[in-house]
C-alpha cells in the first residue's frame, strides 16, 4: 500500500488548528500553569525507563486534541502499519523502509515483495557477532599475527554518523579497541588519523551502501595505498586480512580487494540515515561488544512496539512529532534545539540533523505538487551545560522562537553525584527559566535588595527582563545504556516518520544530495584538466583563482 496523499492544510483538523492558534498565540505558559496546578500530570508520558514532560509547551488539552485529530485525518495509523509491514512507502526509489525489521524479534515475519527478510537479517547478525568476537578476543589477527588494537570506520553520511554517534555515546561500555572515524574527503584529516595507526594491528571497516561514494572510495584508496607502502612489507593478500566492508554492492567491494567472506551485506530497504542497526553498526559492535550492540537493537525494538501499539495520546514519538508540527506550522518556528545533558551525546544533534533534515527537507508533496506549507525543521544543538554558555542567550532573550528538547539521565555512569547533581540542577533550572522568564517586578525586587539607584534601575530593567514562555520538552531517562540509547534513537526516527506522513512528503529519498555529487564530479574533471568550462561568472572566477594559486 502506498501512503495517502492528503494535503494536511485541507483537513478539518488543520482548519480548526488555525483558529485555535489565533487563541493560543498569545497564551502564557505561566498563566496556564497557574490555572491548572495538575498540568504536569496531564501532559506527561511514561514508558519503560523514559519520562517525557511536555507540560512546558504553549498548549492546552484542546491543542493536543486537535493535533491528534490531524494525525487521524491524514491516516497515520494505517501509515504506521504500512511502514512496519514493508509496504513500498519510499515510492520515488520504489523501496520498502525497513530499518525496524533489523531490530525485530527472530520470530517476526516481515515480508519484502513476498519474501520474509528476518532469516537473512539474523544470518548477518550472526556474522557480525562471530566477527566481533574473533576481533575482540584476539583470535583474528593482522598480517604479522598480532591481535587488532585499532579499528577505523571509513564511511560518510549514514555510514558514519550513526556509528560515530553511538560509539561516542557508549564510551562507558567500550572495550580495549581504539576506534576512529574517517568520513570527510579532506585529505588532511585522513593523514592525521593515519599518523596514529600501526598497520600491523589496525582493522579497516569500509562502510558504503552503494560503494560508489566519492569520499569513502577516495579515503579507502588513500588508506590502502598507505597500508601497502614498502616500509611495512605488506602485500596485496594482506589487504584481505585488514579490510572488511559493509555494502549492498558486493561486486565493487570484491574489486577493491576485500575477501568476499569479509563482506557484510545490507539491503536497499535500509536507508543510509537509519542504517546503524544493520551491519553498518559493525564498528559499534566491535567497540562495545556484540551483546551491547544487541541491547541497542533491543531498546529500539521496544520503542517500535510502543510506537506501533500505543494509543496516540500516550505515544511518545507521535506526541513529540505533533508538538513540533504545532510550532513549525502554526507558530512559524524554524528550528528546534536538542540539548542532551550528557557529554556522551555530543554527536546526537549532528546525527539527527541527517535523520531529520535529509528525510523531511522536501518541498514537493506525495501528490507531486509543491507544498504550500512549511516542512522539515532545522535541528541543532550541543550538550548542556556547554550550550548554556554558548547559544542559550538567544533562546532566552532573542527574537526567535526555538522549541527545545532537553534530554537528561537520572543516574550518572561513574556514580559521581556531586557533578551529576550540579549538571541536573542546570537541566531543571533551564527549562523552568525558559518557561517562567523574569518579570519586571522580580527584577525591580532584586534591584531594591541590592540597593541599586533609581536611575540605574530604570536604565537596566528592560535588559534584565526575560519574557519566558519558551517551550521545552523534558526527556528524563533512568540511565544511559545501550538499551536506552536504542530507544532514544528510535523515538526520534519515528518522530521523523510521523512528521513526514503529516506533511505529505516522501521522507526516505534524498534527491537533493545527488545534485551536489554530480556537480562535484564534473568540476573535479575541470580541475584535473585545468580547463574551466561554462559556469556562472562567480563559479568561473572562483575556479580560476583556485587553479592559478594552487
Ligand atoms: O548523503 C547522501 C547519502 O546518500 C546518504 O543518504 C548516505 O548515508 C550517504 O550518502 C553515504 O552513502 P553510501 O553509504 O552509499 O556511501
Image (cartoon, grey):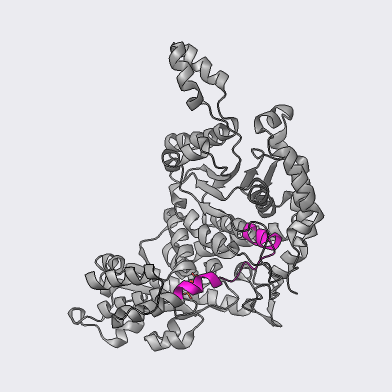
Give me the residue at 47% from left, 15% from top: 447
Identify the image quadrant of the N terminus.
bottom right
Identify the image quadrant of the C terminus.
bottom left
Place of residue 13 in the rendered image (x, y in percent of width and height, measured from the top left):
79, 52
Asked whether 531 or 489 is in front, the reply is 531
Side of 515 where 509 appears, left or right: right
Q: Can residue 181 be seen in this view?
A: yes
Identify whether 541 is placed above or below 252. above
Q: Quadrant of residue 141?
A: bottom left
Query: Does the magenta-highlighted stretch encompass residue 497?
Result: yes
Query: Does the magenta-highlighted stretch encompass residue 203?
Result: no
Asked whether 302 or 463 is in front, the reply is 463
Q: Is residue 224 visible?
A: no
Give me the residue at 59% from left, 76% from top: 121
Prevailing secondary structure class for the magenta stretch in the rendered image: helix
Total marks drawn? 0
Place of residue 236 in the rendered image (x, y in percent of width and height, measured from the top left):
29, 87
Asked whether 44 or 11 is in front, the reply is 11
Place of residue 549 in the rendered image (x, y in percent of width and height, measured from the top left):
22, 69
Q: In which quarter of the image is residue 538?
A: bottom left
Place of residue 36 in the rendered image (x, y in percent of width and height, measured from the top left):
74, 30
Q: Which residue lies furthest to the front in this view?
A: 537
Q: Which residue lies furthest to the right in this view?
A: 12
Identify whether 302 is placed above or below 443. below
Asked whether 456 or 514 is in front, the reply is 456
Q: Which residue lies furthest to the left in this view?
A: 231
Q: What stretch is highlighted in magenta?
A: 495-517
Give me the residue at 71% from left, 60% from top: 502
Amino acid at each position: 500500500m502506498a501512503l495517502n496523499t492528503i494535503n494536511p492544510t485541507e483537513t478539518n483538523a488543520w482548519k480548526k488548528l488555525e483558529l485555535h492558534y489565533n487563541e493560543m498565540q498569545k497564551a502564557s505558559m505561566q498563566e496556564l500553569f497557574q490555572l491548572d496546578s495538575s498540568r504536569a500530570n496531564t501532559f506527561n508520558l511514561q514508558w519503560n525507563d523514559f519520562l517525557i514532560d511536555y507540560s512546558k509547551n504553549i498548549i492546552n488539552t484542546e491543542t493536543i486534541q486537535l493535533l491528534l485529530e490531524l494525525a487521524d485525518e491524514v491516516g497515520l495509523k494505517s501509515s504506521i502499519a504500512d511502514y512496519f509491514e514493508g509496504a513500498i512507502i519510499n515510492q520515488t526509489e520504489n523501496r520498502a523502509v525497513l530499518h525496524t525489521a533489523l531490530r525485530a524479534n527472530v520470530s517476526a515475519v516481515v515480508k519484502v515483495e513476498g519474501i520474509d527478510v528476518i532469516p537473512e537479517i539474523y544470518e548477518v547478525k550472526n556474522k557480525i557477532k562471530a566477527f566481533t568476537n574473533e576481533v575482540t578476543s584476539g583470535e583474528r589477527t593482522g598480517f604479522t599475527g598480532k591481535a587488532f588494537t585499532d579499528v577505523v570506520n571509513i564511511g560518510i553520511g549514514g555510514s558514519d554518523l550513526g556509528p560515530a554517534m553511538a560509539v561516542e555515546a557508549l564510551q562507558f561500555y567500550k572495550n580495549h579497541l581504539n576506534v576512529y572515524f574517517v568520513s570527510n574527503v579532506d585529505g588532511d584529516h585522513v593523514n592525521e588519523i593515519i599518523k596514529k595507526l600501526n598497520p600491523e594491528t589496525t582493522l579497516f571497516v569500509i562502510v558504503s551502501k552503494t560503494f560508489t561514494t566519492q569520499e569513502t572510495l577516495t579515503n579507502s584508496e588513500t588508506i590502502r595505498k598507505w597500508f601497502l607502502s614498502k616500509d611495512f612489507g605488506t602485500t596485496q593478500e594482506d589487504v584481505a586480512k585488514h579490510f572488511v566492508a559493509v555494502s549492498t554492492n558486493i561486486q565493487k567491494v570484491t574489486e577493491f580487494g576485500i575477501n568476499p567472506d569479509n563482506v557484510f551485506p545490507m539491503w536497499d530497504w535500509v536507508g543510509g540515515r537509519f542504517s546503524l542497526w544493520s551491519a553498518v553498526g559493525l564498528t559499534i559492535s566491535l567497540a562495545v561488544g556484540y551483546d551491547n550492540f544487541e541491547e541497542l537493537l533491543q531498546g529500539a525494538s521496544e520503542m517500535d512496539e510502543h510506537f506501533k501499539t500505543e494509543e496516540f495520546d500516550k505515544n511518545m514519538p507521535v506526541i513529540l512529532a505533533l508538538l513540533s508540527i504545532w510550532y513549525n506550522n502554526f507558530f512559524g518556528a524554524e528550528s528546534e534545539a536538542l540539548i542532551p545533558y550528557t557529554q556522551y551525546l555530543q554527536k546526537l544533534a549532528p546525527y539527527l540533523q541527517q535523520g531529520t533534515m535529509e528525510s523531511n527537507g522536501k518541498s514537493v508533496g506525495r501528490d507531486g505538487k509543491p507544498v504550500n506549507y512549511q516542512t522539515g525543521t532545522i535541528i541543532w544543538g550541543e550538550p548542556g551545560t556547554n550550550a548554556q554558555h554558548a547559544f542559550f542567550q538567544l533562546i532566552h532573550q532573542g527574537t526567535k522562537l526555538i522549541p527545545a528538547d532537553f534530554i537528561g539521565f537520572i543516574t550518572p555512569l561513574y556514580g559521581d553525584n556531586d557533578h551529576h547533581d550540579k549538571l541536573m540542577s542546570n537541566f531543571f533550572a533551564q527549562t523552568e527559566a525558559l518557561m517562567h522568564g523574569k518579570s519586571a517586578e522580580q527584577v525591580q525586587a532584586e534591584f531594591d535588595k541590592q540597593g541599586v539607584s533609581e536611575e540605574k534601575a530604570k536604565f537596566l530593567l528592560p535588559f534584565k527582563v526575560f519574557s519566558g514562555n519558551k517551550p521545552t520538552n523534558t526527556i528524563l531517562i533512568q540511565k544511559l545504556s545501550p538499551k536506552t540509547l536504542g530507544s532514544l534513537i528510535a523515538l526520534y526516527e519515528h518522530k521523523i516518520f510521523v512528521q513526514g506522513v503529516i506533511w505529505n512528503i516522501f521522507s526516505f529519498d534524498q534527491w537533493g544530495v545527488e545534485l551536489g555529487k554530480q556537480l562535484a564530479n564534473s568540476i573535479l574533471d575541470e580541475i584535473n584538466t585545468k580547463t574551466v568550462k561554462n559556469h556562472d561568472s562567480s563559479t568561473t572566477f572562483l575556479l580560476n583563482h583556485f587553479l592559478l594559486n594552487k
